Image (spheres, grey):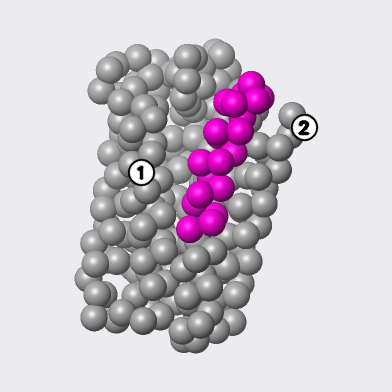
Amino acid sequence: MNQVPNLISIFRTFLALFVAYFILRKPEHSGALMWAFWLTWLVIALDGVDGIIARKLNLTSDFGAFFDIACDRITELIYISLFVTLKWIPFWVLAIFIIRGILVDGVRSMAGKEGKTAFGKKSMMQSGLGYFLTSSRFMRGSYGSIKAIAFASMFLVKAAYPQFLNLEMFLIYLMTFCCVIRGVPVLIEGKRYF
């Protein structure tokens, strides 16, 4: 029972891989794109479900928090890599996510050696603004929502609404901006761990 949140994280990560594999086989098929649209909402919803279950059943742990972040990172990179491979978005978006992920996760691993975590009571963030941008439920939820809408809308636009091409690209750029804005405080405050 205590592994349920981690099993949900694993399932959603494999579901994201399935979506990518499925779309790579039929990137122009509107039915496949609509399936990807709905499955993407499920992938993102499960990201919230694993945390809710962990908190409700008192199954939170430092490992669980790490594992959830790792699965989030893998999932977002699967989607972004898929979109770059299909030439739906520019490569530099993927480069930003990879660079930010490596730097932020590296700093967080150094903080972890001193018993600090990315979120929660033992958060490595000390400033109010840094904590708000990186660790608050509001920002985490907002960022997750932006990613969900950006990823899902990419499939929806390609499937049925090509006239809204600029909308999903705006969301991709907004998601990328939020990625950077949420990473900068970790890098600034994380220098004390070196």
Q: Tell me the amino acid under the disc marked 2.
A: Met
Q: Does the magenta stretch include residue 59?
A: yes
Q: Which residue is drawn at 50% across and 33% down?
A: 106
**Which image quarter holds the C terminus?**
top left
- Is residue 87 or residue 75 the one in the foreground? 75
Q: Residue 56 placed where, x, y %?
A: 59, 26
Q: Tell me the magenta residue range.
A: 41-61
Q: In this view, does 76 lie above or below 183?
A: below
Q: Residue 109 placed where, x, y %?
A: 54, 27
- Is residue 169 or residue 30 the one in the foreground? 30
Specify whether 46 is left or right of 98.
right
Observer able to see residue 95? no
Q: In this view, does 36 lie above or below 144?
A: below
| CA separation in Å, label 2 and label 1 | 29 Å
Q: Does the magenta stretch include residue 42?
A: yes
Q: Tell me the amino acid under the disc marked 1.
A: Tyr
Q: Residue 65 placed where, x, y %?
A: 57, 30
